[in-house]
Image: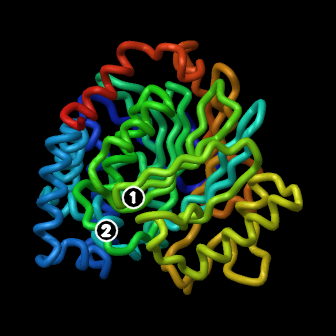
């Protein structure tokens, strides 16, 4: 697909798990070497004192989610880096509570549900992130936003199962993770439907914290799924809601978290704009309010994050229409990329209907040995 405007790249990755990872590594190699390897965050997560934790998570990933372990191995080879380094980077939010990727999501349930999302991340990756069209040998095809050096599934993604996921960081304290949260969100992205994704998370090892907004073609509600520290909490939204990367349900491990000023201000501002009836993209591009803004472009952002892309998806009964903006969407007339993913009838039905056997096999591959 030809970009309409802007600066976000796009690649296609196809084949087995290792092949997918290798293609992602090649696409991100230059940026990782220019920007990431000299960063303070990279030096910290790859430090020697964290190596035993990285080894433990790598072993658990290999045992429980071998296909994703292969993807990480291909990613490392494509980047020209060691597997432990790349594993550590993809476990950064589990190793360090104050990891980045502090995003904002707007959830509008209804007859045609809408998910809209600001992808906020490290500013030095501006212009080097990309969309990837994932065409695996087995399992669902999908489109996902990717950071250089990271596996897909922890940002926003649309799969041909009709499943749409956006991901927000939770900064949980004192979690001894056995598996990276990014591995779990990647596995959820491969699920045939939302219920299968939630079952996968409930059966998963302990990880750091994420919030997933899950919508699916054929379903009027939108699910808020918070997980981390061994807990999973699900809320089915039937009214408009917003989430700004801290847990809103305060019980168990999800209650012990760091909430930055930006996260608190964005949540408060989003709640106000929802009450005032703002449309989701106007909310995500808002720079007003008394505190730090939802749309983040400050060079001295206190969380060291900026808005790198915006995502909008509308779910119909048999398809998902999606759009992505990058650069400064306030100054552009239209999205940089847009598409429509048509959904097989079985995938768009409520959970009581059967999903396709091929997709069920793809999920079983990810969760074997999990129970």
Above/below status of 358 relative to 218: above
| Front position in the image: 203 or 19 | 203
User: Any mark on residue 175, and which?
Assistant: 2
- Left/right of residue 2 with respect to residue 138 in the rendered view: right
Q: Name the outermost residue toward the front.
A: 252
Residue 140's image quarter? Answer: top left
Above/below status of 178 relative to 158: below
**Secondary structure at numbered mark 1:** strand
Residue 171's image quarter? Answer: bottom left
- Left/right of residue 81 with respect to residue 24 in the rendered view: left
Residue in the picture at 23% in, 37% down: 370
- Left/right of residue 153 with respect to residue 8 in the rendered view: left
- The quadrant of the picture occupied by the C terminus is top left
| Front position in the image: 308 or 204 | 204
Alpha carbon distance from label 2 to label 1: 8 Å
Residue 323, percent from left and from top:
65, 42
Residue in the picture at 59% in, 73% down: 263
Residue 345, percent from left and from top:
57, 13
- The quadrant of the picture occupied by the N terminus is top right
- Left/right of residue 47 with respect to residue 358 in the rendered view: left
Residues tagged 2 and 1 counted as in contact (Cβ below 8 A) = yes
The residue that mark 1 highlights is 228
Residue 271's image quarter? Answer: bottom right
Give neighbour class at mark 2: few <14, some 14-19, many 20+ (Cα, 10 Å): many
Q: Is residue 36 visible?
A: yes
Give neighbour class at mark 1: few <14, some 14-19, many 20+ (Cα, 10 Å): many
Residue 71, percent from left and from top:
24, 42
């Amino acid at each position: 697909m030809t970009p309409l405007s802007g600066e976000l790249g796009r690649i296609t990755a196809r084949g087995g798990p290792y092949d997918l990872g290798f293609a992602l590594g090649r696409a991100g190699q230059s940026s990782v070497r220019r920007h990431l390897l000299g960063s303070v965050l990279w030096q910290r997560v790859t430090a020697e004192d964290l190596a035993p934790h990285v080894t433990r998570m790598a072993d658990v990933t290999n045992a429980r989610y071998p296909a994703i372990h292969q993807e990480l191995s291909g990613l490392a080879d494509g980047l020209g880096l060691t597997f432990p380094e790349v594993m550590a980077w993809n476990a950064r939010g589990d190793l360090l509570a104050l990891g980045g990727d502090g995003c904002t999501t707007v959830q509008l349930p209804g007859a045609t549900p809408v998910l809209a999302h600001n992808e906020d991340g490290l500013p030095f990756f501006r212009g080097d992130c990309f969309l990837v069209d994932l065409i695996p040998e087995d399992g669902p095809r999908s489109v996902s936003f990717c950071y250089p050096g990271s596996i897909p599934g922890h940002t926003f993604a649309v799969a041909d199962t009709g499943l749409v996921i956006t991901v927000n960081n939770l900064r949980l304290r004192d979690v001894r993770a056995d598996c990276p949260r990014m591995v779990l969100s990647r596995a959820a992205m491969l699920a045939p439907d939302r219920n299968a994704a939630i079952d996968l998370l409930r059966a998963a090892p302990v990880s750091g914290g994420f919030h997933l907004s899950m919508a699916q073609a054929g379903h009027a509600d939108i699910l808020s799924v918070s997980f981390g520290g061994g807990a999973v909490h699900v809320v089915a939204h039937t009214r408009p809601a917003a989430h700004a990367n801290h847990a809103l349900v305060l019980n168990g491990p999800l209650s012990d978290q760091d909430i930055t000023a930006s996260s608190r201000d964005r949540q408060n501002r989003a709640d106000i704009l929802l009450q005032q009836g703002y449309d989701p993209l106007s909310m995500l591009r808002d720079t007003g309010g008394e505190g730090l803004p939802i749309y983040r472009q400050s060079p001295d952002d206190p969380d060291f994050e900026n808005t790198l892309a915006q995502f909008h998806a509308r779910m119909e009964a048999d398809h998902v229409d999606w759009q992505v903006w990058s650069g400064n969407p306030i100054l552009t007339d239209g999205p940089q990329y847009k598409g429509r993913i048509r959904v097989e009838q079985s995938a768009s039905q409520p959970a009581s209907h059967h999903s396709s056997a091929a997709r069920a096999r793809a999920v079983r591959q990810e969760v074997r040995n999990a129970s």
